[in-house]
Amino acid sequence: MIDGLVEAIRLAVTRIPDDTVSALQRAYEEEESEIARFNLENILKAIEIGKTESIPVCQDTGTLIFFVKAGVNSPFLGELKGAIIEATRRVTEEVPLRPNAVDILTGRNSGDNTGRGVPVIHWEITEGDEIEVAVLPKGGGSENCSALAMLTPSEGWEGVKRFVVEHLKACGGKPCPPVVLGIGVGGGADYAMGLAKRALLRRLGERNPDGRIAELEEELLKEINALGIGPMGMGGRTTALDVKIEVAHRHPASFPVGLVVQCWANRRAFLRIKPEGRVEVWQ
Ligand code: SF4
């Protein structure tokens, strides 16, 4: 199981998924600005080098975040947390990853990407005997542009769009655009942020199954690209590659909106652990 986790993390940090590479290539082909084409070309080169040389696509290898769907009858449940921590240590040394876990009081770096609360593990108990793990290495620059808005219900969806567009405008080039946006609406402050981050696991171009939410995703994508922030914030047609919205019911008095910004290094990988111990890894 540890070998499988190591493989999934290595894949996530060294190889950008095909959907994101295609979206970046499309952005390059459609771009007219010379500087934007130059920036996209360099991003695509970094991705190609990462793939061919099996090295991280960016110097910031991020904080490792795991989303676990834990089948209640899996024989591996008890050892999974320890295996994730051990795999994180191994990958940090073997790939290597940049050590990104710093003590909140002393500022001391643990050196192996583990520490209090990290790697971050989100647990969901599911039926069955399989475990599915999603790995999301999250860069600090884009994470710094994440935000929460507690809107009033009267502001509604227009308020959501205003908040997201204004916030992205203020961030400019800081999150290393072209970005992917995860937006969570409803549930409460913590839940909205969780939905937003989880939304980043969806493939680019895959719309929310609810047609009304899907329309909002399309509208927001157009509005954000109309800002002209462009690749690496130096102007251009493509500021965002996609927008993903996930929703939950809300309290009648609240309209929470979580926004998680992902950079062009839209890294992710998945792992399935079968009950007999067989492991499948994919992107
Ligand atoms: S925000 Fe993303 S692309 Fe920019 S430095 Fe961090 S990980 Fe790298």
Image (cartoon, grey):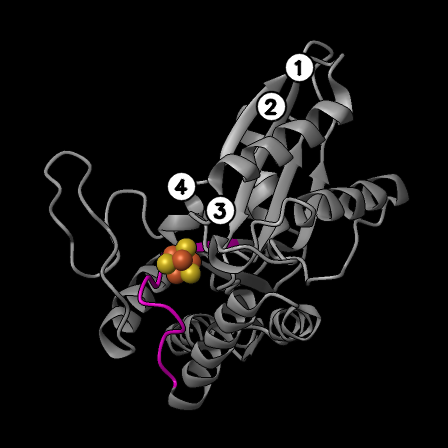
Q: Please provide the residue range marked out in magenta.
A: 54-67
Q: Mark 2, mark 4: which one is toward the viewer? A: 4
Q: Which residue is mark 4?
A: 144
Is 43 situated above or below 129?
below
Label 3 – label 1 distance at C-alpha: 24 Å
Q: Residues within 10 Å of mark 1 (few under 14, many from 20)?
A: some
Question: Is 92 one of the magenta-colored residues?
Answer: no
The answer to whether residue 80 of the structure is visible from this angle is no
The residue that appears at 79% across and 43% down in the rendered structure is 219
The residue that appears at 58% across and 73% down in the rendered structure is 17
Tell me the amino acid under the disc marked 3.
His
Helix, strand or loop under label 1: loop
Indicate the quadrant where residue 24 lies.
bottom right
Closer to the N terminus: mark 2 or mark 1?
Answer: 2
Tell me the amino acid under the disc marked 2.
Gly
In the drawing, what numbered circle is on residue 122?
3
Closer to the N terminus: mark 2 or mark 3?
Answer: 3
Q: Position of residue 122 (x, y in %)?
A: 49, 46
The residue that appears at 22% across and 60% down in the rendered structure is 99
Label 2 – label 3 distance at C-alpha: 17 Å
Are the two marked residues, 4 and 1, in contact with CB atoms closer than 8 angstroms?
no
Question: Is 57 one of the magenta-colored residues?
Answer: yes
Label 4 – label 1 distance at C-alpha: 24 Å
Q: Which residue is mark 2?
A: 188
Q: Which residue is mark 1?
A: 254
In the drawing, what numbered circle is on residue 1?
none
Q: Main secondary structure of the magenta part?
A: loop
Label 2 – label 4 distance at C-alpha: 21 Å
